[in-house]
Image (cartoon, rainbow, N blue to C red):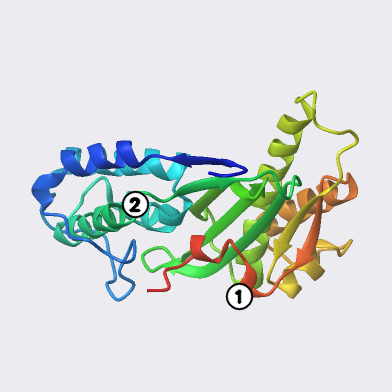
Amino acid sequence: VSGGYALSQSHYIQKVLQKFGHLKIKDASTPIDSSINLNKNEGRCIAQLEYASAIGSIMYAMHCTRPDISYAICKLARYTSNPGIDHWKAIGRLLGYLKRTNNLGLVYNGFPSVLEGYTDASWITSAGDNKSTSGWIFTLGGGAVSWASKKQTCISHSTMESEFIALATAGKEAEWLRNMLLDIKLWPKPMPAISLRCDSQATMSRAYSNIYNGKSRHISLRHEYVRQIINDGIITIVYIRSSDNLADPFTKSFY
């Protein structure tokens, strides 16, 4: 790429498509079909070991260069222990999307040379256990350097709580990335606070409040942590509109 660097796994993705070519993969324009509700398979398990192999193969591409499939692989990985026909159809669609977008990758041009983060959550996206989904992404030099889509480990009682859980998790990632960059001799010191963008004003208000009056212990602990890393100058929280939040596609499907 002129004036920058590009990372792509097109050759690896082609090998994955060949490995699972017997699925008769067809091109797809999106990673997952939001009109289909995937649920736990109560019937006969279908090719569990091969399903786990497919998840692992696709997950490797997701972790390295394909943040756009994070939500899809996060959702499909939940059914690895007992996949059914609907889960296999979803795997075929995801592979079809990778086939169509084989040449996509990450591009870095050096600007801006500031680490920035985005965080978001979708309240109660798992019908089986009423848990929400967290998503975050950090960019540096014009490209993504860290991202994730994960089902939350505890039940949140409101949209604000789910957003706060996601914020605390993204804060931990910001702290880890900051410590790593501080070990790089060329990085300027002292390092400014990392801007963490959030589209929930209620969550921001809670984060900057000195007192948490709620009764939920899991939120109280996260509130203390977020307040601490704000006071330590590790992060600063900035409001951003949902339409501009890069973490939004990590929490839900729009298709």
Query: For mark 1, does the 10 Å Cα neighbourhood hold few (<14), some (14 to 19), or many (20 or more) residues?
Result: few
| Image coordinates for residue 218, horizontal then vertical, percent | 66, 55
In terms of depth relative to the viewer, which is nearer, 161 or 243?
243
| Image coordinates for residue 70, horizontal then vertical, percent | 44, 53
Q: Which residue shows up at 68% across the image and 75% down it?
A: 241
Which element type, helix, strand or loop, lies under badge 1?
helix
Which of the two discs, 1 and 2, sits closer to the camera?
Answer: 1
Which element type, helix, strand or loop, lies under badge 2?
helix
* Residue 237 placement: quadrant: bottom right
Left of 29 or right of it: where is 244?
right
Which label's residue is closer to the chain start, 1 or 2? 2
In terms of depth relative to the viewer, which is nearer, 242 or 111?
111
From the viewer's perspective, is residue 153 above or below residue 18? below
What amino acid does circle 2 point to? Arg
From the viewer's perspective, is residue 109 above or below residue 134? above
On the question of residue 145 being in view, the answer is no
On the question of residue 136 being in view, the answer is yes
Mark 1–mark 2 distance (CA, rounded to whole Å): 28 Å
In terms of depth relative to the viewer, which is nearer, 166 or 142?
142
- Quickly name the residue at label 1: 243
Placement of the C terminus among the 4 image quadrants: bottom left
From the viewer's perspective, is residue 254 above or below residue 140? below
What amino acid does circle 1 point to? Ser
- Quickly name the residue at label 2: 78
Left of 86 or right of it: where is 217?
right
* Residue 32 placement: quadrant: bottom left
Q: Which residue shows up at 50% across the image and 64% down it?
A: 249
Query: For mark 2, does the 10 Å Cα neighbourhood hold few (<14), some (14 to 19), or many (20 or more) residues?
Result: some
